[in-house]
Amino acid sequence: MDVGGDTRRRLVVIGHGPAGHRLVEALRERDTAGAWQITVIGEETRPAYDRVALTSYLTEDAELAFPAHGPGVRLHTGDPVTGIDRAARTVTTASGAVVGYDALVLATGSSPFVPPVPGRDLPGVFVYRTIDDLDALRAHCAARPDAGGVVVGGGLLGLEAARALQGLGVDTHVVEVAPWLMPRQLDEGGGAMLRRHIESLGLTVHAGTPMAGLEAGPDGGVARVRLSDGSAIESSVVVFSAGIRPRDELARGCGLPVGERGGIVVDATCRTADPAVWAVGECALVDGQVYGLVGPCFTMAEVVADRLLAEATGGPGQAAFGGADTSTKLKLMGVDVASFGDPFADRAEGTLGVTYTDPVGGVYKKLVVSDDARTLLGGVLVGDATTYPTLRAYVGAELPGSPEQTLFGGTEPAGGDLPGATVICSCNNVSAETIRCSIRDEGLTDVAAVKGCTRAGSSCGSCVPLVKKLLDAELVAAGIEVSKAICEHFEHSRAELFDIVRVRRITTFTQLINEHGRGRGCDICKPAVASILASLGNGHILDGEQAALQDTNDHFLANLQKNGTYSVVPRIPGGEITPDKLIVIGEVARDFGLYTKITGGQRIDLFGARVDQLPQIWKRLVDAGFESGHAYGKALRTVKSCVGSTWCRFGVQDSVAMAIRLELRYRGLRAPHKLKSAVSGCARECAEAQSKDFGVIATERGWNLYLAGNGGMRPRHADLFASDLDDETLIRYIDRFLMFYIRTADRLQRTASWLEGLDGGIDYLREVIVEDRLGICAELDAAMERHVAAYSDEWRDTLADPDKLRRFVSFVNAPTVPDPSIAFAPERDQIKPVLLAGPQLEVVSR
Amino acid sequence: MTADVQTGPAHAVPAPTTTRWHEVCAYEDLLPERGACALLEGIQVAIFRTFDGELFALSNFDPFSGAYVIARGILGTRGGTPTVASPMYKQVFDLRTGRCLDDTEVALPTFGVRRTPAGRVEVAL
């Protein structure tokens, strides 16, 4: 391979929206040889963000940015491309930069359509597309409290905008030219039912009434919207959200064919008339259609990534855009709305529409089937879309039951018998067959792994129940029993065992296994039950029978290392330590000859201690004011912090004090898996709180709480749970989050995968924790209070108990003899372990 | 029947000729359902007391990790077999035969162990 040469091909991507971002990620993921050198040129100053979630930016201050591309991608933002020279294969930007390409991808997106009505340019008139648009809208509304406002467009985006506008305190009207709302997705019955829901939430809908124009007030800004029937709506803010138009001006400018109504003409591989130029996303006209949904746009990006890679490697590309599933499901202001397949197919001959209306419950459902009532063609769901994932998967296939059964029965997701070509995840265009193959070939056994491997369920998440069914069916077919049993000794899941222990007030493993299990347990169930007993507060983890349940780390209150020695981590709350205490750690490490390493969680780890040395080491540390750091436990490990407002020029809250407070509150709390936390003193996020099980980031007004993040093997950005909390509310929410997790998670399940498996996700969690939907908050609060009150240092307690101390010997028949098998060699002025016998077998880590 | 493949450093393999019983500790020194290690003539022997009071003795050497840690494993049952799981990489061994249940090519050496009428634990080398 010629490392120094210029053999790499140059790819230029114009536009850094979701489609451009996906293209780059897809290419980078597969182009392991680095055949393409990628430059992205974006018009907006921000890198790509999740436009689909735009409204949550206004209503929840959500962070929308997509993950940054890895190294090797040159991202040039805030500098629109002004021209393309196809002959020279260069693009020119507004700042005058000229960039050459071997392949060019247009991912320029679309712009909002603003109908040519009088007054459309008045101050106070907005569109709803970018973060800049939203910032301007918010500033405008903030200056006009109690204003009236109009959203022009009652489609999907229009209703999103209406929700946002109402969230800004504006008395909101929706004007839709069609006779009902969401006319592209819903039939008249569905649109009418949606209107009832929307109006019950305080919005006013004007459907079937075109707008005549906008009129200015005395200040020159928009003051009212005039409708064609002569009526007027007082309105100091107007948002146009009446459809999109492809951004095809660059293509036009360089002579590439565009459609009659706009859109860059491409073939099924998303290539334009110029073989070196491609178009993806909302700017592309593929098979005569422009797609405004994120799913098809992602598919186009994947197709082009595949083709570009094939081009660079000389192989044939396989991927092509074969049309897209435009099924949609969304929650609009709390109302489930879904349409799938062809919801209007019943307008054609030879089809039947089966409808169900429940005006009291606000539910409307329609299924369109072939005239033999067997094949599902499409449908509409308003007010209750629980059956959406299954129904969507059955589009084009034979229904398992009659249409009535399907409508009322809440059809269980089928899984096993779905045709292979069925698209399960329409956001990422993943078929049932793709999912089945990955499960079989990669040996996947849980939904999180399927998500990671196939991307199915990783965008909107609506297909996750179906993915789970497919997974279960595959595992059963492979002879892998899908059992929630924790091991052969209990038929229960960990969560069930937790409830049994809690409700029946069981305090010993023997009682639990005698009454609810069989056999004598194993290295799976014993530590799990030990953890449950500890979470519910049953004294020292080495008391009585509990001692025998603990794995070796908990049994010796230290971490087993590869040569049979242990490492010791004293707690350093918040990572704050006095020089004197730091010196003590250094002295202990020196005196016992321990290898010393600073951890990622702002602690100090001392390695190479024999079991008989552990009590002596703890004694020195405890005498100096240290306590166990629980590095050995499935428990709170660390609450890391940045230096915060006390010292930092940018800090807005005292992150160190909060981190110490949290760490001292949750220290010793046993959980299904380890727990990590961090507190950052400002939005710069130096403590990396968003990669923690619970992370806290300071704001001007308080704290933002992020939940269920993870670093490690499967990184996950934490979800913003709540914003601008005061100290007490923050702690109350974390208390409940932790206790709810401890109650309901599986064995060794981190909070990240727990939340991903939680039906309803972060919204459901909010209902449980903030709104007390399950009525258990008082119990959760009390459980945490008991934990805090009962906390005691495990090292100190062990030192005070001669019975426990007697276990800390290498040899029961020779307590004073050190283990002769333990040896060390020097490395970089410290010790490293040496295995005298050496491993005798090759071990595959399990 | 095939012979067990005994794996471990040479000095851990007991000499088959004469049986010598070594007193190790009091029976009450052993925690129920837990192990302890004895050093006997330079050999590390892991001794276990199960829930029903039975005693077992195996080599303390874990052939999968090369560390002397078997005595620190968790006891249990698999099917009806009494077991210990290595604390290092969690392979499970039959306490009675030393055979590894996760890799039947591997077995730990076993030793005779008994409780004397005086309540002492003895191991045979």
Image (spheres, coloured by chain):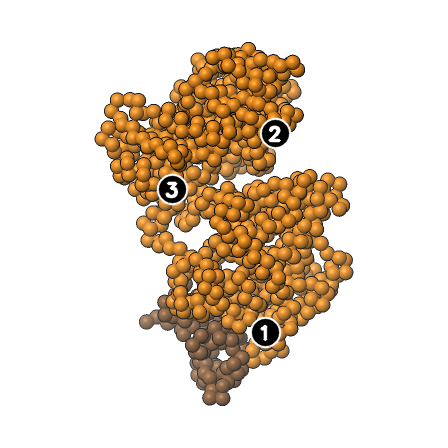
Q: Amino acid at mark 1?
A: Lys
What is the total number of numbered labels drawn onto the structure image? 3
Label 3 secondary element: helix
What's the residue at 45%, 64% (across, down)? Answer: A504
Q: Amino acid at mark 2?
A: Arg
Pointer 1 residue: A804
Q: Position of residue A722 (x, y in %)?
A: 58, 42
Pointer 3 residue: A466
Mark toward the start of the polypeptide (3 vs 1): 3
Q: Position of residue A601 (x, y in %)?
A: 64, 52
The colour of chain A is: orange
Q: Are marks 2 and 1 in one subunit?
A: yes
Label 1 secondary element: helix
What's the residue at 40%, 65% (across, down)? Answer: A516
Q: Amino acid at mark 3?
A: Leu
Q: Is residue A799 above or below residue A427?
A: below
Q: Are marks 3 and 1 in one subunit?
A: yes
- In which quarter of the view is residue A619 placed? bottom right
Crowd rating for badge 1 (residues with CA inside 10 Å; few <14, some 14–19, many 20+): some
Pointer 2 with pointer 3, Cβ within 8 A: no
Chain coloured brown in this rendering: B
Mark toward the start of the polypeptide (2 vs 3): 2
Q: Which chain is home to disc 2? A: A
* The disc label shown at residue A46, or none: 2
